[in-house]
Image (cartoon, coloured by chain):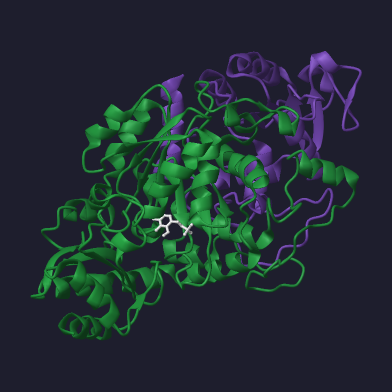
Chain colours: A green, B purple
């Protein structure tokens, strides 16, 4: 018998969900509860010892959140996923499994400003040392590898400039170094890019953006590709060594190709505590059901607006990899043939001042620090999301002072263009 | 059989078909993977037989340990081998001497022996390597979804609430993902490394 494989849109609606066994409710219920009763003390002990499947406490697992986890794992083609309170929480939990104090990880310089900040400052206090590399120069990743390197971190489509990263080339560097490749796939979503198919070992998301998609809930998720052998050398003791908190269980030996997700849950989420609210999981799940429709519209609108801006006399440059002639256009065609995303930057001939007045003249675009909403959004990264960086680092990460970032929503594109037109004239 | 990527239909047929499972290398230590798997499969209604010469005279969850497959003294459907790859062949040879022989040889996560698999397949047995029957049962029934694991199955049917000792339906629709480039790559990498 041939197993028929459902497509992406079917998975976006169905994966992980089934009618509630007790009530028959077809939509995944919001299990807004902190804890779950045990059948008896043996059942409780089995659950605490990781021997049985089932829920204990919502900091560790929750049935609403589990549906979200399985759905994203299915869309990304991973073996398992762990949802957490935010994209930033996902990054902490992932690296906690991989780095001991004094270890290093290599990160692409072109990242969300908050991630640059988290890596540079917060992680330094844990003794996790970031080494920066340039995603436009693969050799810079090779040169950054040392015996203490434990992971490589990149964004598939980088915030803010929407540049596309050559995932396969960097996966090859990671493979040679014997370390996992972590890809933040927030701006692409699995609808546009599935990093695991290109060699990623771990995918992280801020669910807050396009996956949730409606600007109403924070969330993050970690997807385990099931591809990495954590026990090959002694680099990853969290996964390969007996865990004292579980009486000597070895995580990889016991859980095989979803061991990393289990480690994130039973060592990361359990002990660090950044659990997602079941209500947020519910809202994000509802958002994901329309992901394919929304992403197609986001990308279609973004391309039309990028084209409009490219032809406008007041605009100096548009950084949208979906435009022919953009330096990332070849990578966009290879990795994101369905569309180059909906977050990009442009600069104005009038410089910083013109950017500030554009933002204040817009009537439909909202001026706020988020991306991936149904609504169109605008921000000046240099003074907000990337403000902690010095000028050189701003420019390197794609947030020079004259740059404005757009996140294009799913409104009628004609209305968005009209709004930009009046604001640029204004 | 391609032992890097089993179709769900193959695993499903095995787990739906077998009733008794002899677990070679079963451990009474409750943090060992074999203990986890033994306990779970017993709870899901399989007739479990612990095989481990080091523990004869003791019980594992009320089932007496036997020293070898020959000591079981009744037909078994499946042999689940919790031993390193280097210890697989003698177990398979012993299994093939049983009368009647088992229907399935299952090698645990991390265990692979191509030659032993070929011997068993030539004798008409089904072989699974480098998988865990607990994980596969949990996956195909979607019980494992509680932990955010991708069951790679879908169903629009209302399933009964699972209770102790209950067999779960494994007959859900299979979904892609198990046979992605990623899992093939992982299997290949592991082989390259050994
Ligand atoms: C690419 C990227 N990664 C991570 C994050 C952090 O996510 P969160 O705000 O959910 O913590 C963001 C948020 O802007 C982002 O754009």
Q: Residue at x 55, y 44 (%)?
A: A93
Expressed as whole percent of the image width and height from the top left, the position of residue A280 reads: 59, 67
Kindly give the residue lying farthest to the left in the view shown: A313
Q: In the figure, A372 relative to A155: above or below?
A: below
Tell which of A369 and B69 is nearer to you: A369
Q: Quadrant of ligand 1?
A: bottom left
Tell which of B97 and A210 is nearer to you: A210
Q: Which residue is drawn at 49% across and 29% down?
A: A229
Q: In the figure, A423 relative to A261: above or below?
A: below
Residue B21 visible? The answer is no
Expressed as whole percent of the image width and height from the top left, the position of residue A253 reads: 62, 29
The quarter of the picture where residue B156 lies is: bottom right
Expressed as whole percent of the image width and height from the top left, the position of residue B80 reads: 69, 29
Expressed as whole percent of the image width and height from the top left, the position of residue A330 reads: 17, 52
Tell which of A267 and A190 is nearer to you: A267
Residue B85 visible? The answer is yes
Tell whether A258 sits left or right of B168. left
Image label count: 0
Tell whether B192 sits left or right of A391. right
Tell whether A129 sits left or right of B170. left
Tell whether A270 sits left or right of A320. right
Q: Which residue is drawn at 12% across and 61% down?
A: A324
The quarter of the picture where residue A422 lies is: bottom left
């Amino acid at each position: 018998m041939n197993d028929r494989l459902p497509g992406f849109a079917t998975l976006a609606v169905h994966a992980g969900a089934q009618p509630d066994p007790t009530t028959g409710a077809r939509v995944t219920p919001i299990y807004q509860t902190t804890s779950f009763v045990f059948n008896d003390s043996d059942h409780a002990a089995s659950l605490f010892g990781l021997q049985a499947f089932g829920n204990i406490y919502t900091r560790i697992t929750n049935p609403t959140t589990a549906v979200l986890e399985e759905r994203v794992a299915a869309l990304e083609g991973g073996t398992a996923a762990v949802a957490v309170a935010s994209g930033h929480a996902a990054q902490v939990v992932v690296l906690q499994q991989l780095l001991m104090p004094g270890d290093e990880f290599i990160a692409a310089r072109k990242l969300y400003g908050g991630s640059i900040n988290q890596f540079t400052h917060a992680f330094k206090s844990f003794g996790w040392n970031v080494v920066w590399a340039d995603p436009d120069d693969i050799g810079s990743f090779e040169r950054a590898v040392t015996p203490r390197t434990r992971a490589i971190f990149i964004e598939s489509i980088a915030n803010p400039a929407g540049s596309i990263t050559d995932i396969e080339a960097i996966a090859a560097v990671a493979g040679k170094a014997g370390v996992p490749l972590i890809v933040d796939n927030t701006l692409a979503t699995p609808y546009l890019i599935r990093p695991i198919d290109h060699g990623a070992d771990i995918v992280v998301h801020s669910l807050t953006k396009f996956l949730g998609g409606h600007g109403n809930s924070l969330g993050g998720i970690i997807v385990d590709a099931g591809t990495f052998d954590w026990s090959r050398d002694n680099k990853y003791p969290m996964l390969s060594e007996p865990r004292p908190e579980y009486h000597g269980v070895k995580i990889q030996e016991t859980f095989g190709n979803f061991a990393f997700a289990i480690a994130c849950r039973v060592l990361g989420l359990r002990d660090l505590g950044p659990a997602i609210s079941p209500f947020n999981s519910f809202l994000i799940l509802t958002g994901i059901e329309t992901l394919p429709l929304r992403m197609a519209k986001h990308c279609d609108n973004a391309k039309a607006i990028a084209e409009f801006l490219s032809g406008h006399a007041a605009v100096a440059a548009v950084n949208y990899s979906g435009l022919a002639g953009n330096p990332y256009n070849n990578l966009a065609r290879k990795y994101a043939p369905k569309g180059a995303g909906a977050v990009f930057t442009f600069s104005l001939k009038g410089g910083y001042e013109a950017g500030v007045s554009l933002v204040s003249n817009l009537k439909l675009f909202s001026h706020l620090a988020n991306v991936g909403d149904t609504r169109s959004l605008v921000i000046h990264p240099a003074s907000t999301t990337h403000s902690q960086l010095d000028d050189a680092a701003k420019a390197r990460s794609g947030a020079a002072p004259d740059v404005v970032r757009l996140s294009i929503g799913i409104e009628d594109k004609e209305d968005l263009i009209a709004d930009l037109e009046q604001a640029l004239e204004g | 059989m391609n032992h890097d990527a089993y179709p769900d239909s193959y695993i499903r047929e095995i787990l739906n078909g077998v009733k008794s499972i002899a677990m070679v290398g079963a451990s009474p230590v409750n943090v060992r993977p074999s203990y986890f798997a033994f306990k779970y499969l017993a709870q899901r209604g399989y007739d479990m037989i612990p095989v481990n010469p080091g523990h004869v005279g003791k019980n594992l969850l009320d089932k007496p340990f036997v020293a070898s497959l020959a000591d079981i003294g009744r037909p078994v459907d499946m042999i689940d081998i919790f031993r390193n790859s280097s210890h697989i062949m003698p177990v398979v040879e012993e299994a093939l001497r049983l009368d009647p022989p088992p229907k399935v040889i299952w090698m645990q996560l991390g265990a692979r022996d191509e030659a032993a698999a070929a011997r068993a397949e030539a004798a008409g047995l089904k072989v699974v390597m480098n998988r865990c029957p607990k994980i596969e049962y949990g996956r195909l029934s979607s019980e494992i979804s509680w932990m955010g694991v991708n069951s790679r199955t879908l169903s629009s049917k209302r399933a009964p609430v699972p209770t102790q000792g209950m067999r779960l339906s494994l007959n859900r629709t299979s979904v892609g993902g198990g046979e992605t480039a990623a899992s093939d790559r992982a299997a290949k990498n592991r082989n390259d490394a050994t």
